[in-house]
Image (cartoon, helix red, strand yellow):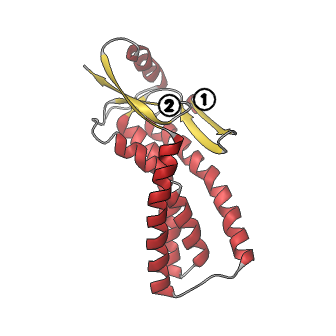
Amino acid sequence: MEEMTGEEVREVERQLDEERYEVYDRTFSVARANKQALIWGGVIFIVTMVAFVAVWGPRGNGFSELLWIGLTIFAFIFLHELLHAAGYILAGKVKAGDVKLGVFWKKLTPYAHCKVPIRAEAYRFAVILPVILGIGPLLYAFAAGSYFWMMVGTIMLIGSTGDWMIVRSIREFDRDAFVEDHPEEIGCRVYVKK
C-alpha cells in the first residue's frame, strides 16, 4: 500500500462526497456495544480467572490492591485512547490535528476520533492497537503470577470489546477501502469505489 500525505487524504475526503463510492454504515449503538461487552466480558473474566487460579492458586492482597488496580485501569483507559490516536497518525499517515481526543461526559466515555478518512488497513490497525493493554499485562501476569496484572489485563481486554466489534464489522472490505471514523457513534462508514 502506498503511503498518503495529509493533503492526499483530504483530497480523498473531498472525492468521497461524490457519487463514485458506495457507503456502508458500520456504527453501533452504545446499548449494543455494552451488551456485547457484558457477554464477552463475562466469558473473558471467567476464562482468565479460572486459568490464572489453576496455574497460580488464589491470590490478592485485599482492598489496597483493588484500589491500585482501579487507579491503574483509570490511567490505562486514557492510554488506550492515546494508542488509538497514535495508530491513526502512524498507520493512517494523518496529522496530529486530524485526530481529536476527548470525553463524552454524558456517557463518561473517553474517545479518540480521526477526523479524516483513512485506508481500511490503517483503520483496523489503529482500532485494534490498544488491545495490547490487555494482552501484555495478561502475559506478564501468567508468567509472574501477578494477580494485580491479571485483573488489569482482563479488564482492559474486556474494555476492548467495542474495538473488536468495529474491526469485525469491516473485515469484509478490502484493505484499500476508505474508512471514516464516526465522530459520535461507535464505529465508522466505509467507502468503496463503485
| Amino acid type of the residue tagged 2 in the rendering | His
- Nearer to us: label 1 or label 2: 2
> Which is more toward the observer, 65 or 34?
34
Image coords of residue 35 (percent x, y): 48, 51
Image coords of residue 149 (percent x, y): 58, 71
> Which is more toward the observer, 22 or 41?
41
The residue beneath circle 2 is 182
Q: Quadrant of the N terminus?
A: top left
**Residue in the image at 55% along x and 48% along y:** 83
Say few, some or many: other residues with alpha carbon within 10 Å of mark 1 (under 14 / 14 to 19 / 20 or more): few
| Amino acid type of the residue tagged 1 in the rendering | Gly
The residue beneath circle 1 is 97
Question: Horizontally, is 194 left or right of 186 in the view?
Answer: left
Q: Which mark is residue 156?
A: none
Question: Horizontally, is 64 left or right of 171 in the view?
Answer: right
**Residue in the image at 62% along x and 53% along y:** 77
